Image (tube, rainbow, N blue to C red):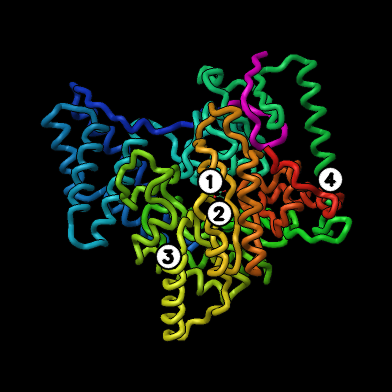
Amino acid sequence: MIVMQGKGVSKGVSNGKLYFYKRVDTTVTQQTVEDIEAEKARFAEAQEKAMAQLGVLADKAREEAGDSAALLFETHAMFVEDDDYVDSVMEIMEDAQCNAEFAVRQTGDQFAAMFKAMDDAYMQARSADILDVSQRLINNLMGVAEGGIDADEPVILAADDLAPSETIQLDKSKILAFATSGGSGNSHTAILARTMAIPAVCGLGEELKEEYEGRAAYIDGETGQVIIEPDELTEKALQTKYEKQQEMKALLQTMKGQEDVTLDGREMMVYCNIGSPEDVDAVLSNDGQGIGLFRSEFLYLASSDYPTEDEQFEAYKKVAAAMEGKRVVIRTLDIGADKQVDYFQMEKEENPAMGVRAIRICLNRPEVFRTQLRALYRASAYGKVAIMFPMITSVWEVKECKRACASVMSELEAEGIPFNKDTEIGIMIETPASVLIADALAKEVDFFSVGTNDLTQYTLACDRQANDLGKFFDAHHPAVLRALKIATDAAHANGIWIGICGELGADVTLLPTFLAIGIDELSVTPSSVLPLRAEIRKSIAKTCTLDLLEC
Ligand code: PEP
Ligand code: MG
C-alpha cells in the first residue's frame, strides 16, 4: 500500500486505475536518420491517420452543429494533403537527413509565420490552423493519444496539472477522478472536477510518480489522500465511506423542489456555475434555480478558430431555452492568464494574471466583442439571459461595455432580429479596485457577482494557481469578507442584487457570514446546490453575525 497526501479539492471517494495524462511533447528535436524512405513512410502513415481522424471529427461536428462546424475539419484535411506543405516536409527530411517530426514542426512554423504576415485577417487566422494540423501530425508520429486519454475503461486521471484548453478536450466519460501533483483548489481542473461532481486531489507534488501508471488506487477527495493498492482494512474503510456518500446523495434528493429560504423566511437564490451547454442537465437534475455564471470561454477554448456568431448563438440559446425562463447569467469572454487560446495570438506576458485578460481583450478587440454581444442579445429572445462582464476595474470600462451593448441592440433592431431590450447587465467584482469603487459601479449596472477566486488572489496577492502558498492563501481572510460587505452595501444602497459566483459561495461554513453580510445569491457547482439548500433551510438569518470580519 502506498499513501500519497495532497489537498482534497472535490469531495467523494472513487477507485480505479491510475492513468497518466499523455501530453504531447512539443519540444521536437532534430534527429539524424539513415533510412529516409522509412521516415517518409512514417510521415505517410501519420497523414493517413490524420485524414481518418479529421473525417470522424467533421462527421461529428456536422451531426452536432451543422455544415459550417464541419468545414473547419475539412479545411484541416486539405492542409494535411496540401502539395506545398507536403513538398516542404519532404525537402527538409531529405536535405537535413532528419526525422519527420522535425520536418513537420519546421514546415508548420514556417507556413504559420507566412500566414500570420498576410494582410487579410482571415488568412492571418489560418496560421492557427496550420499549427493545429502540424501538431496533429506530430502526435500521430509520436503515437500520442488525442485528448490525452487512450484507455478502454474509466480511469483516475493523473497529471502534473491540466490547462483549461486540455481539460476542455477530455473525454469526460473516461474520468473517475483527478489526481494532480500541482494545481490548487481554485485551479480550473478543480473547478471542472466539482462541476462534474467527481473526486479530485491536487498538490501531490513529487509523491505522484509516473511509475504508478496502471496501478489500482482509491482517491478520497475529502482527506486529500490517494492510496495505491490499499490493505484490507483501509479498503474496507474507504468502501464504507463510499457507501455512506451514496446514502447521503439519496437523502439530499429530498431537498429537490424545496425553497431556498431560512427558517426565519430570508430568501437566498441558489444558482449554478456551468462551463458548457452540456452542464445544463446537471443544473436541472440538481434543481438549480438559475445559472449565475456561464463561463462562455469554453466555446473559444474548444475551438481552433474564433467561434462564429451563429455557433455562439446556438450555444447560448440552448442554455437559455433549457432553463425555461429562469435567469441565465452569461459571462463574456474571460481568457488570458491561465486560459490561453492560440488563435488569439496574444503577446507573451511576464505576469499574465495582471495582463491583457478578460474584458481588457474584449475592449481592445471590438470585433470579437461585438460578435459575442450579438450572439448574446439574439439568445435573449429565448429565455431570461443576463450579460456579465469580468475583471472590471473602472467605471469607464463599464460605460464602454454598455455602449457596445447599445450599438449591438440598434443593429439587431434595424435588422429586425428579435432580442430582449431589458436584458440585465452586470459585472463581476473580482478586483480590489472594483470593491473600492463599488458605489459608483453599482449606479451603472443591474447586478454584481463576486468572483472570489480572483478577488482572493488579487486582495491577498496570492497566485490562485500556486499550491505552495499554504496558510497565506486564506479565502476566509477578513480582508476578503470585508470586501464582500463593502460591495454588498454599495449594491443594496443602489437597489441592485449581489451574488457570489466564486468557489467560496459553496463553502457552507461561511453561509452564516454571507447571510449576515446580506448576499442575495450564491452560484455554485450543480452538485453543491442540494447540500447548500439543506444548510440554508436549517439557518436563522437574524442570528447570523459578522464575527468573521474581525481581525
Ligand atoms: C472568480 O474569479 O471567482 C470567477 C468566478 O471567475 P473564474 O474562476 O472563471 O476566473
Ligand atoms: Mg475570475
Residue picked out by circle 2: 435
Q: Residue at x 66, y 39 (%)?
A: 476
- Amino acid tagged 4: Ala
Report the mark closest to the observer, 2 or 1. 2
Q: In this view, does 262 lie to the left or right of 113?
A: right
- On the image, the x and y values in percent for residue 390 come to 50, 56
Q: Can residue 402 be seen in this view?
A: yes
- Amino acid tagged 1: Asp
Is 95 rendered above or below residue 231? below
Label 2 secondary element: helix
Residue picked out by circle 3: 396
Instruction: Indicate which disc, 2 or 4, sits on the residue closer to the N terminus.
Output: 4
Label 1: how many Cα within 10 Å (few below 14, some 14–19, many 20+): many
- Is 533 part of what is drawn in magenta? no
Q: Is residue 400 left or right of residue 225?
A: left
The CA distance from mark 2 to mark 3 is 15 Å
Q: What stretch is highlighted in magenta?
A: 1-18
Residue picked out by circle 1: 454
Cβ at disc 2 under 8 Å from ligand 1: no
The CA distance from mark 3 to mark 1 is 21 Å
